[in-house]
Each structure stands twice: as C-alpha cells, then as structure tokens.
Amino acid sequence: MRNIVVVLIIILVTSGCGTQTSSNNDRKSQESHHVDQSEKNSAEMLLEVGAPTKVAINELENQNTLQVFKQTDTTKVSEENNTDNFQEEEVFLKLLNEYNYMFDRIKPDVNYDEFNEEHVGYKFKTIRTKEQLFNKFTDIMTVDVAQKTWDVFVKEGENGLYLIPMDLYPMFDKNNPYSIEKINNNTYKLVHEHQSGLHGNFDMIFVFEKFDNTWKITDLAYQYPDKQA
C-alpha cells in the first residue's frame, strides 16, 4: 500500500511539470506572435505615413544630385556672363577715355593766334567744315554722336571752321558710380552718374553697339532729375 502511494505521487509531480512546460511554451509562442504582429503593424504604419523606403531614399539622393548639378551649371553660366561683361567693360572704358580726350585730337589744328570777332572763335588750320570735324571721331563713335557732342562748339564761316571758346562737354569719370546693362550681344547701355561743379549732377547715358566686330558709341543722352534732355 505504501509503495502504491509513492508511485502515485511521482506520477502527479511528473504530470505537473509537463503541464507547466507546455504552458510556458504556449506563452512564449503567443508573445512571439504578438511581437511579429506589432512589427508588422509598425511597418504598415510607416508605409502609410510615407516613411522613406530604400527606393524613396535613392530617388531623393538622385534629386539632390540633379539639384546640385543644376546649381553648379547655373553658377558656371553666371560666371561666364560676368567674364564676358568684364571684357566688354574694359572696351567701353577705353572708348570713354578716348571720348574724354577728343579735344586733344583737334587742338593742334586750332590757330589760337587768329580770333575772328564775327564768328567769335578761333579758326581751324585745315579743318574747314563741321563734317570734316565730326569724321575725326568715327573710330570711337558714330557721326550722329559726334555731331551731338561738337555741334555747339564750332561754327562754319565763309573762310573756314571756327572753334567757339567755351567750357568743354561733360566728361566720364570712372570713379563716379556707373552701371552697365546688356541689351543684346551687340548692344550695351552704360549709365554714369555725372557729378561736377561745372555741369551739375545728372546721368550720362551711353549706348555701345558693335559694327564689324568693332564697338562704337552710338548714342549719348543726359538725364536730369525729374526731367530728360
């Protein structure tokens, strides 16, 4: 009888351990399933809100690369334009320097020993007409601009051309502010802020055009505050 009781106790203990092991396994399986399901739900939520996938990241990198390329390309074009403008500016400044010293070209031809009271001027030695005078400057400007600049300073008479003594035209001063605007490949406009006690303050507007690969001043205008001349 005593042996039978011992055997029954052993059977009950063994059965209980098996049940506990089985319960533990079932619990672990349920927890694993719960974790997998949670990860699946999290992944689905990320996709729904537009989280970056590997494909999306690649596309974003490609867009950034393209954007950098565009910026670099634009910068290159801008630098080329600035270089072109700088080269043209040098040409324009040389022309304006020649414009400032136009009188030096004709001064040797003026006879300061012969002043004509009738024409109120000094007679030129060899230049006899306004047209001849204007043609002295056609390497830097058109005849029209030369006429606009010089017509008021000279007077034609029966015996020749006379220089009227008066203050010269307004000069270009590169130390004063100026701006250059590109109209097209063959036309530029330079606006210069002229400031002097002799002529006053106003804008000088020069237009440069290229003819047969040569730049010339093709227009010159003065713009005063609140009015234009």
Image (tube, grey):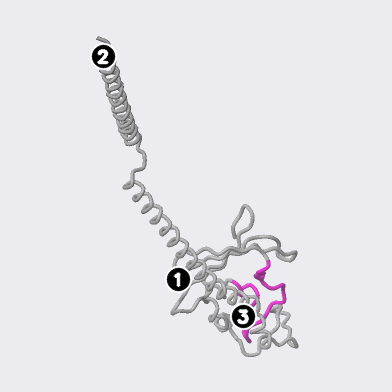
For the N terminus, the image quarter is top left
- 111 or 208: nearer the viewer: 208
Distance between mark 2 and mark 3 Cα atoms: 156 Å
Q: Which residue is mark 3?
A: 156
Residue at the extreme bottom: 126
Q: Which residue is mark 1?
A: 186
Distance between mark 3 and mark 1 Cα atoms: 36 Å
Q: Is residue 36 left or right of residue 108?
A: left
Where in the figure is residue 192, as x and y percent of width and height? 62, 64
Please say whether residue 154 is one of the residues in the magenta stretch: yes
Q: Mark 3 falls on what kind of element?
A: strand
Disc 1 vs disc 2: which is toward the camera?
A: 2
Which segment did they paint magenta?
149-175
Where in the figure is residue 110, as x and y percent of width and height? 69, 86
Residue 112 location, quadrant: bottom right
Residue 49 location, quadrant: top left
Q: Mark 2 falls on what kind of element?
A: helix
Disc 2 vs disc 3: which is toward the camera?
A: 2
Q: Residue at x 55, y 72 (%)?
A: 145
Q: Earlier in the sequence, mark 1 or mark 2?
A: 2
Q: Which residue is mark 2?
A: 3
Q: Residue at x 25, y 16 (%)?
A: 7
Q: Earlier in the sequence, mark 2 or mark 3?
A: 2
